[in-house]
Image: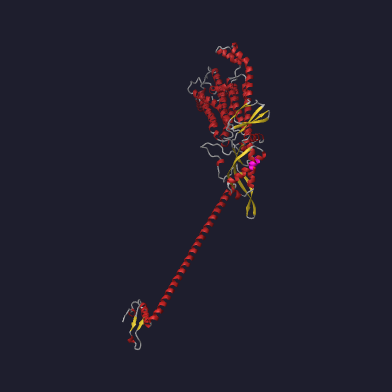
Amino acid sequence: MGNAYFRDGTSARNAQPYRLIALACLLLVGVLAFIVCLRSSWAGLRWLAPLAAMWLNVMLVAIGCERNLMAAADAARKRTSRGARPANWNLLKRATWRAIAGWTWGGLRAVRWWPWCVLAGALVSLMLCAATVFVFDRHAAAAGPHVRNIMALACGAVLAMAFVTLVIERVIVARVPVQHADTVLAGALRIALVVALACAACAGLYLWRGVDSRWLAMAIALLPALVAGEYALRATLAWFTPPRASASPLALVDSTVVHWLVRPPASPAELGESLRSRFGIDLRQSWVVHSTLRMLPAAGVALVAAGWLLSGITILQPEQRAVYERFGAPRAVWQPGLHIGLPWPFGLARVIDNGAVHQIVVSDIADAADVANGASIAAPLIAADARAPEQLDRLWDVAHPWETSQVIAGANAQQQNFEIVSADVRLDYRIGASDADARAALYRAANIADVTRAIANREIVRYLASHTLDALVEARQTVIADAIRQATQQQLDRLGSGIEVTAVVIESVHPPAGASAAWHGVQAAQIRTAASVAEARGLAATLVGTAHEQAQASVAEANASAAETLSAAHMQQTTFSADIAAQQAGGPAFAFEYYLRNLQQGLQNANLTVIDDRLVGDRRATIDLRSFNTGDAAGAKKLF
């Protein structure tokens, strides 16, 4: 009972191709889904998601074909063995565990697992298609040194896959007898072939011109999404239908969308027969159809001639002008408006800009692929809530790929050395307004942006090499920008390119990012040195001011003391002169009176001890002016 699929050898052999195709599709889906889920491949291999979704759909179809074939074989076997019944009780003789295993297997087979499997596979396929639109589309195109090699390898692998798919589809179509399961599987393989070729076209466009063909990947994702959506709808409706109506497993994966896309177009005879049998319209007897068929060649020629004559009409927008060539020679420069000339190829209008200003990043990017991928775009457009790109980062402690680095001569006292300087320079240019500038820009430069970038880069290197790092850092950026603009314009005028440099923007001039920490340390040391010198000068000025103040105070004090001493001397001299004059006038009486006054003044606050003259016989009274202690009776003031 558990080996029911292989009881009929013919059915097993017929189901073997479907089983191999299902296993191969499962392997492809696993590999492609693993590559798609890698975060590093989101930007470059986003077109593998719809391919994995389509192969998942093919796997469901292959499993459905196998189940349909085996179900038909089981039904035929049941019909042939319906009347045969075992005459003995073989079931009772078997072991209990084998009976339980048989009943369990029969119960599992009775459950309708196939709609669930189809629904799960369809939902996974829809998720892969949705990821192509809503997840991978938010990431920019991949950029790197090995991206082109990986893309070329992926393109070759997808083309080989498409070839194998084509071979398998042809083999299935050529099988005899033709079965409905083969037709359904061949249609799914054709859709997978179309998806594979579209995915290879995505990789080919990137390899050819570096085009980020996300629009093609999103458009091709709609095809497996439609098929998977129909599978999911059929599996959902199978739960609400009677079991007999959905008995065929192939009915869940027999897509109407696939039939519409792979059905060959009807021939005119088949179309006429269909109209005649369904609606009774006989186109063979309609004079309108015959007249139209007779007039069709002349009308086609007239339309082609009118289209060819209209190729001589050119409409130029306000931001455009064109150089008109007649028989390969430039004749005039057309301004915006409507112009009429000879039709192609006798007359040709080559459209150029009409005063539009372009900005480029002048850097030493050597890889043209980096320029094509947008590494030299000055101001890329970003969403308001998106992460700011590296082009808008003005900090120079991180290396930027669009900066120009140059080794220049350095000056350090009497020694010679070398220094490295990095500059972020943007250049704005436009084609000159005159007709001569328009012709020169069109015929003398294969690529205006590349020519302008090369000349500007050379002039920037020349300017940086002629200055030291300190001079470049300390100089005003407007002065540097004006010098570079004049030198670049002179070179462009010498070549007769017709390009006008409108402005040069210096975003930054600084040492390399690797020396940022050391440079910041040097700047901090210089700031600390300047602060220390200023602090020392302030302290010195304070000390000098204090010394001047003290000296001036000492001089003023000495002058005041000298003036007081001189005034006192003059006063004493005046007093002495007056005393001499009074003594001369008063005689001895003045001298005695002067003596008594001075004695009174001297004895006014003195401690006096008067010694009686009678203590000593031959002497007069004595006044003792010596000082004694407070408690000594001899020190008391006595008056006699």
Query: Does 460 appear above or below 588?
Result: above
Between 430 and 397, the residue placed more toward the observer is: 430
> Splitting the image into 4 quarters, where does residue 128 fall?
top right
| Frontmost residue, 414 versus 57 | 414
Question: Residue 352, percent across and down?
Answer: 62, 33
Q: Which residue is at 61% across, 40% downward?
A: 501
Name which residue lies at 63% across and 55% down: 413
Q: Is residue 368 visible?
A: no
Say if 183 sits above or below 422 in the image: above
Quadrant the C terminus occupies: bottom left
Name which residue lies at 63% across and 46% down: 463
Tell me how the rendering is colored: secondary structure
Secondary structure mostly seen in magenta is helix
- Among all residues in the image, which is located at the extreme left? 640
> In the rendering, at what x and y percent does residue 507 appear?
57, 43
What is the residue that sits farthest to the top in this orientation? 285
Outermost residue, front side: 585
Picture mark count: 0
Instruction: Kindly tell me whether residue 151 is visible in this rendering.
Output: yes
Residue 491, magenta (yes or no): yes
Q: Can you give x and y, in whole percent of width and height, for residue 139 in the image? A: 55, 35
Judge whether residue 633 is colored magenta: no
- Residue range of the region highlighted in magenta in the rendering: 487-492
Given residues 165 and 12, the one toward you in this image is 165
Q: Quadrant of the N terminus?
A: top right
Q: In x, y percent, where is residue 428?
A: 59, 39
57 or 76: nearer the viewer: 57
